[in-house]
Amino acid sequence: MVSAFEWYGCLLLLTGVAGSVSQRTDPLTPPAPEYAHSIRLDGDIILGGLFPVHARGERGAPCGELKKEKGIHRLEAMLFAIDLINKDPDLLPNVTLGARILDTCSRDTYALEQSLTFVQALIERDSTDVRCTSGEQPIFAKPDKIIGVIGAAASSVSIMVANILRLFKPISRDSKT
């Protein structure tokens, strides 16, 4: 499982610090995005997270500068809590928590777009007509099934995301509505 020191590398990737070190040598390769916008930690139970790690971008860019106190600190708090829970053998015996944390870039529309990542595991894909160039059936990576979402920072964003995620809520057999 990922410890507090190991997830720091994930944080560097999310904030773009680690990604900005690589250099482009092949002119045909498209440039890497300036910022990666997610962190993924494996676990038996996956929690979603939406945090404004970056400020709103200017001139059409989705993301701007880092938001240390309202974005990074909240992200660190979630990762730290997951780390503490996973290290305690009495709290969730034989179960590990994981996470899929997304950057909202302080924009409600971008957060809404990002939150659709959380419902990908619930959407069935019809791949009967899809073939690889070799003629074989493609293998799709199964997305994480998120059981709950922590965030977002603004209530307007939380309301929008909750309304979208509610559409994918499993219907209970005992439910009368």
Image (spheres, rainbow, N blue to C red):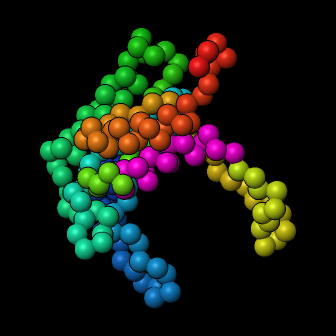
Q: At 41% from the left edge and 36% from the top edge, which residue is drawn? A: 162
State how many labels appear: 0
Stretch of the chain drawn in magenta: 110-124
- Above or below residue 156? Residue 136 is below
Q: Is residue 108 left or right of residue 169?
A: left
111 drawn magenta: yes
Q: Position of residue 74 (x, y in %)?
A: 24, 38
Frontmost residue, 123 versus 47: 123
Magenta run includes residue 175? no
> From the viewer's perspective, is residue 11 above or below residue 60?
above
- For residue 62, say whether it is visible: yes
User: What is the x, y in percent for residue 79?
Assistant: 32, 36
Residue 39 shows in the view: no
Horizontal side of 42 relative to 64 (left or right) equals right
Q: Nearer the viewer, residue 34 or 5?
A: 34
* Quarter in which the C terminus is drawn: top right
* Residue 154, quarter of picture: top left
**Residue found at x 38% / y 18%:** 88
Residue 174 relative to residue 55: left or right: right
Q: Residue at x 50, y 48 (%)?
A: 117
Furthest residue in direction front, as rendered: 177
Which residue is located at x 49 percent, y 15 percent? 93
Please provide percent x and percent y for residue 43. Answer: 50, 33
The quarter of the picture where residue 58 lies is bottom left
Magenta segment, principal secondary structure? Answer: helix
